[in-house]
Amino acid sequence: MADNLQQTIRSKMLPSLRQEMTQYAIVSLYLFVCFGTIILYKASILRQVGVHYVPYGFAIIKALIIGKFILLGNAMQLGERSRNMPLLLHVLHKVIVFALLLIVLSVAEEVAAGLIHGHSIGDTFARFAHETWLQVLATCLLLCLVLTPFFTLRAIGQTIGWERLRQMFLGEKGLRQSLRSSK
């Protein structure tokens, strides 16, 4: 019986876990690059007024958290109702649905972190109230801009096939072989 369980784990669960972790790594890396770039831009602006600010650790943590939220949303098949619509409408629908999900889950995350650090829910929401409507709008728009290419590539990959998409980006040989042959 123990051998059957180990066999089942090796044959079914490990490949699924490997695929899930690969997706998580890709999503998180993409988000880290986006968030890191935004933080770099913010740091360069603040440096001009004498404020030295470069919290790249924040970008890594936020990318890991938001990456998991995106995978949860995918597992719940959010935004799939629009699957049969034209690509543009499907991507816009997914971006809006996921942006709303990420905003709600990010607020919940901030509330939970506040409670862990001994702050009341009111104190946590008071911190949000200090942001101007323009900051909130800019954050939401940036989130939509970050999600748009991500969901566009996913929709194209699901439509034409992941292998075909990989070949379109990396060529028939793949990136490693192309890099080796160019040396």
Image (cartoon, helix red, strand yellow):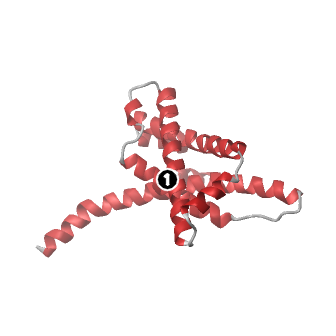
The total of numbered circles placed on residues is 1
Instruction: Indicate the secondary structure of the residue bearing disc 1.
Output: helix
* Residue 114 figure quarter: bottom right
Q: Is residue 177 above or below residue 58?
A: above
Q: Quadrant location of the C terminus?
A: bottom right
> For the point 44% across and 58% down, which residue is it?
22
Tell which residue pokes out farthest to the bottom in this image. 2
Classify 56 as above or below 69: below
Residue 52: give x, y in percent of width and height.
82, 65
The single residue placed furthest to the right in the displayed view is 49
Of 33 and 180, the residue lying toward us: 33
| Quadrant of res 7 | bottom left
Identify which residue is drawn at 71% across, 56% down.
39
Q: Residue at x 48, y 37 (%)?
A: 94
Please identify the quadrant where the N terminus is shown: bottom left
Residue 8 shows in this picture:
yes
At x 41% / y 30%, what residue is drawn? 82
Q: Within 10 angstroms of label 1, few (less than 14), some, or many (20 or more) residues? A: some
From this viewpoint, which residue is outermost toward the top?
A: 86
Q: Is residue 147 left or right of residue 81?
A: right
Amino acid under label 1? Leu
Where is residue 73 shown, x and y percent of the image? 42, 48
Disc 1 marks which residue?
A: 105
Q: Is residue 48 above or below residue 92?
A: below
Residue 42 in the image, given as x and y percentages of width and height: 76, 54
Camera-side residue: 71 or 23?
71
Residue 26 can be seen in this image: no
Image coords of residue 105 (percent x, y): 49, 53
Q: Is residue 91 left or right of residue 72?
A: right
